[in-house]
Structures are given as C-alpha cells and as structure tokens.
Image (cartoon, rainbow, N blue to C red):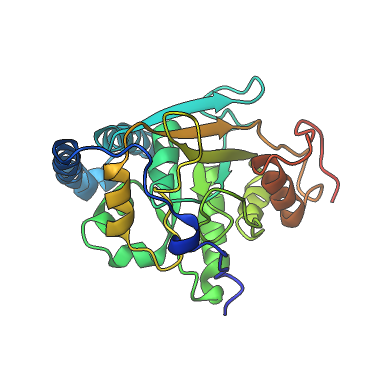
Amino acid sequence: MSPWLPVAPCTVASCVAAPADAAGPARRALRTLGAVLVVLAGLPWALVSHRFGDARRAVVAMVWARLFLRVLGIRLEVHQVGDQALPPAPEGPGGALLVANHVSWLDPLVIAATVPCRPLAKSEIAAWPVIRSLVAGGGAIFIDRDRLSTLPATVRAVADALRGGQSVAAFPEGTTWCGRAVGPFRPAVFQAAIDAGAPVRPIGLKFCDREGDLATGPAFVGDDTLLASLGRVIAARGLVVEVTMFPVITYASEGQATRRVLAGIAQATVSGGPRLRHDAAIAA
C-alpha cells in the first residue's frame, strides 16, 4: 500500500447510520430532479470557464456549489474562530492553503460554497463523466495518489496557484473518515504553502441533523458508492453542514516552519486539540 493512500478504519456497516428524520417520497423526488437540473445548468459554464479569469471562475463555482447544496436540502452554517475575515485575507498578494478534514464527496462543494478557491482533487474524478467537467471547470488541480513520482509537480502547481493569489482547498487526511474522528494530516501539500510563503487556514467540517447531533449519512467511506451516499443525503431532513473557519497559521519566513509542523498544528486545530498560537513564528 502506497503511503500516499492511507486507509481509514471507517466502514459503512460500522459507521454510517440512516437518517433519524427521513424525507418523504415527494421531497426525495424533488431533490433528485433539482440536483440533476443544477448539474446540467453548470455544464455549459464548466465547458467555457477556462476563457474567464480565475477570480470570476471561483465566484461562479461558489454560487453553483451553494445552489447544489440547497437543492439537496443541506443548510450551510459558517462559524469563525477569532477575528478573521471571509474570505481568508492572507498576508501579502498570494492565496491561502485551506486544509480541512474529509468526510464526504460533498466536502469540496462545501468549501467552494464558503470561500472562493480551487480544489485539489484526486485524479480518479477525471474518469467520472459529467463530474469531471464540473470539477475541471471549477479550476481543480488534480493529484494522482497512485503515482508518488507526480507529487512534486502537484506541489509546484499548488504553490504557483497560491503565488498567483488563488486559495487552494486540500484534504490532507488523504482519505475520508465518518466524522467521529480526524485522521492524521499528511504533510506533503503543506510544502506548497511554504514554497509560496502562503498562510495555512484550517477548516473543520461536520455534518449534523436538525438537533445538532452528528449525521453520518453524508459520509463516503470504505467500499461505499457515490449513488448510495447521494441517496442517504437526499433522504435526510434537516441536514446541516457546519463549517468552522479557524485563524490562519502564519510564519515569519521560509525556514521557520516545516511541512510536518504545519500539518501537526492544522490537524490539532481541526480535531479540537490544545489551543495554539497562530500569530507567531513557528519554530521548526
């Protein structure tokens, strides 16, 4: 097993539960139809999005992602820790590396609906019809986790995007968890932030029901299928995704932080670890 292909202990049988409050057949049908229409509406833009600037493309992707979540019946709640503004305001002209825990195939859409950014997406998505076009239209940077030899090029692509003023969203766990815990953050992508001199912004994602309890239906773990996960999402009533935006992790200059240090701080922040100072230089 490649070290770039971690495996979470989560499985559908042991971790995923049906929604406690299920939608009726009519509501499920409307959500399914709405999702199809939003996807079809996004395809023409995705096919011509390369003709527009990165900023406009990110804004359109944000609007589309919000609409898609809405038709699926998912309410987006954004919480901020500290006095940081949305979208992230990194120091200098570059973008910020946005790093979040990974629960569902919905996660990139949730981040895109919250902050204008480019997603770092696995190359397998490029083999999915329709979805491939939508993801590419959103400016995705693809990573081939089966070929470690391509990793340096991916890190360079992310660093170039950050230098160019674009924020990039990544999921450093390298796999999905059910939401009950946060897996180890792999350090590779943090090298792009160091190379670009860009801040890192941790983001916590949690799917809940209307009572605020953890909802595992949206999880996409183990041998789960996209259709099965989508079916659970469509069937749930009162589904909420809580997005917690933590303060950016900044460092004085290159050489005063390592990718492992940044990964450790981001993981501790997202998983609710000890309170850490993010406004001081980080010692390697």
Q: Quadrant of residue 36?
A: top left
The residue positioned farthest toward the front in the image shown: 20
Q: Nearer the viewer, residue 142 or 254?
A: 142
Report whether residue 254 is seen. yes
Percent x, y of residue 178: 51, 53
173 up-or-down from 54: above or below: below
Q: Is residue 183 left or right of residue 25?
A: right
Q: Nearer the viewer, residue 225 or 55?
A: 225
Report whether residue 166 is seen. no
Q: Quadrant of residue 5?
A: bottom right
Percent x, y of residue 7: 56, 68
154 up-or-down from 114: above or below: below
What residue is shown at x 57% (from left), y 22% (from top)?
85
What residue is shown at x 62% (from left), y 56% (from top)?
183
> Quadrant location of the N terminus?
bottom right
What residue is shown at x 70% (from left), y 37% (from top)?
249
Q: Is residue 192 left or right of residue 60?
A: right
Q: Is residue 170 left or right of residue 42?
A: right
Percent x, y of residue 97: 57, 44
Q: Quadrant of residue 128?
A: bottom left
Q: Is residue 169 left or right of residue 38?
A: right
